[in-house]
Image (tube, rainbow, N blue to C red):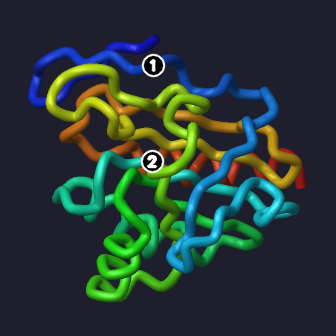
Amino acid sequence: MATITFQGKPISTVGDLPAIGSKAPDFKLTNRKMQDVGLAEFAGKRKVMNIVPSLDTPTCATSTRKFNEKAAHLHNTVVLTISADLPFAQARFCEIEGIKHITALSSFRSSFAHDYGVELLDSILAGLTARAIVIIDENDQVTYTELVSEIADEPDYTSALAALVNHVDHHG
């Protein structure tokens, strides 16, 4: 369990992010066509998971826009924005915002938030996901994680993208 804050007040998560170097837990998330997808659908690709509480909040929208811009053109990489928002709302958000380079996935009917340790247990946000970044390599190994300590803050894009680039240089 980790403790983070929302507007300065402590909130607990159900667990911890997957350990760096560990095999990423498989997941079942729902895409905009209401199809369930897991790690197998992204086999052989690097995966940047931009985990957010809701696309209907300013910080989540900003992080999705920034990842759409920055990480979308990286070689052999998919950017997955994951929230509890329903797929219909995610599709509408991506369409309105012109988000074309990320895949929005919903955790609304899965154990993803629990399995990845990001489910919020208390406060008005209980049941949503904490803000986090998890990067998984082509072999489904976790190579980078960040649990954002204050939910209202944006993630550290520079470190996440540097980890992605350094991992390639180091291993490829």
Q: Is residue 58 above or below residue 125?
A: below
Q: Amino acid at mark 2?
A: Ile
Left or right relative to 40: residue 165: left
Around disc 1, counting alpha carbons within 10 Å, would you say few (fewer than 14), some (14 to 19), or many (20 or more)? many
Q: Is residue 101 above or below residue 62?
A: below
Left or right relative to 170: residue 73: left
Q: Circle 2 — which element? A: strand
User: What residue did someone put label 2 on?
Assistant: 51
Q: Give the residue displayed 22% in from the left and 34% down from the top.
A: 125
Q: Identify which residue, 80 or 108, lies in the foreground.
A: 108
Q: Give the residue displayed 46% in from the left and 11% down from the top.
A: 1
The quarter of the image holding the C terminus is bottom right
Q: Give the residue displayed 50% in from the left and 43% down from the top.
A: 133
Q: Circle 1 — which element? A: loop
Left or right relative to 26: residue 78: left
Looking at the image, how many numbered discs can be counted on the residues? 2
Q: Is residue 135 above or below residue 10?
A: below
The first of marks 2 and 1 along the sequence is 1
Point out residue 41 in the picture as x, y percentages from the top left corner: 78, 65
Q: Identify which residue, 124 or 103, lies in the foreground.
A: 124
Around disc 2, counting alpha carbons within 10 Å, would you say few (fewer than 14), some (14 to 19), or many (20 or more)? many
Point out residue 145 in the picture as x, y percentages from the top left corner: 56, 34
Q: Amino acid at mark 1?
A: Val
User: Disc 2 or disc 1, which is closer to the eye?
Assistant: 1
Q: Give the residue displayed 36% in from the left and 44% down from the top.
A: 155
Q: Which mark is residue 14?
A: 1
Point out residue 92 in the picture as x, y percentages from the top left corner: 32, 81
Q: Identify which residue, 141 or 29, lies in the foreground.
A: 29
Q: Identify which residue, 120 or 8, lies in the foreground.
A: 120
Q: CA distance from mark 2 to mark 1?
A: 15 Å
Point out residue 50 in the picture as x, y percentages from the top left corner: 48, 52
Name which quarter of the figure residue 33 lies in. Answer: bottom right
